[in-house]
Amino acid sequence: MLLKTTMALLFCYTTVFASERRVTTENTAVYTKPNADSSIVGHLAKGQRAWVMEESGEFAKLRSRTRRELWALRSHLEEIKPSEPYNLGVDVDAPFLAGDSDFKRIRFDLGGATGRALNESFLELAVGVEYFMMERLSWRNSIFYRRYQVASDFMGLDTSVRGNGNLPLGALRLRGILGVGYRFATAIEGAPFVELGGFAELKGFDIGLMVKYLNRSIFDPDRENVFVYSVVLSGGAGFF
């Protein structure tokens, strides 16, 4: 009996969570609270698709990149059958981001990395701050410390400009990153680099995998180029 009840509750929860709907009424108002007397922050066009995260009475909570409260009347939304094709050009997030005064431009991150140089493996720990100059363009600076078993440890600063892009894969929310930058180090380890990776949202934070390629041979052909593989936890701002 307990198992059946648990399964029933789980089914109800997953049915409501991240359910895709279509707007059925032109200029459907979007409110800050599940109340028609609350402030209206924008309107959705008829035919536009939205992801409903939860329901409250006559209202449905819409997915928001900036994690703001966005609510619309359930009667103006209809469920979309799984067999229907997904239109990647339509996303309810977009109208509420470009002019959103509450859009937070700062992200903080903590990461651990590994790689191989000087014929031995190393570990790196980095703490970074990323500033979004605009939705798709950011500037990140991070302090890192690299530890070897035999070779001398050193620390430094990575600075890079990144291009960011959201991948609209239904309820799975991913952010892709491509960046270029320069590593300043206390040892003779300074070098330009390119970086590539992706982040997924998890419980209000972003967790991601990054690959950084340090072109150390650009100044000295005898120096080897190095790959750095990182796992990063990021939070502090509402990019999505």
Image (cartoon, grey):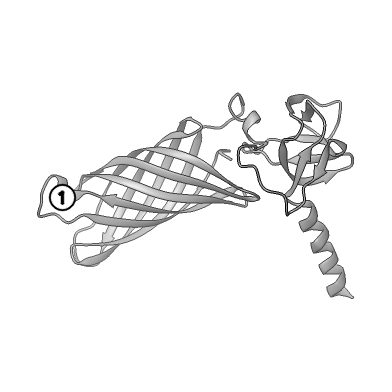
Please tell me how many numbered marks the rendered image carries: 1
Q: Is residue 13 left or right of residue 198?
A: right
Residue 33 lies in what quarter of the image?
A: top right
Whole-percent x, y for residue 26 in the image: 80, 27
Q: Quadrant of the N terminus?
A: bottom right
Whole-percent x, y for residue 193 in the image: 28, 45
Q: Is residue 184 left or right of residue 72?
A: left
Q: Is residue 44 above or below residue 126?
A: above
Q: Is residue 225 above or below residue 178?
A: below
Residue 131 lies in what quarter of the image?
A: top left
Of residues 168 and 155, the one drawn nearer to the viewer in this rendering: 168
Q: Quadrant of the C terminus?
A: top right
Mark 1 highlights which residue?
217
Of residues 238 and 156, the one drawn nearer to the viewer in this rendering: 238
Q: Amino acid at mark 1?
A: Ser
Of residues 181 and 131, the one drawn nearer to the viewer in this rendering: 181
Residue 138 lies in what quarter of the image?
A: top left
Whole-percent x, y for residue 114 in the image: 34, 61
Q: Residues within 10 Å of mark 1 (few under 14, many from 20)?
A: some
**Residue placed at 89% from the left, 39% from the top?**
58
Q: Is residue 21 left or right of residue 152?
A: right
Secondary-structure class at tag 1? helix
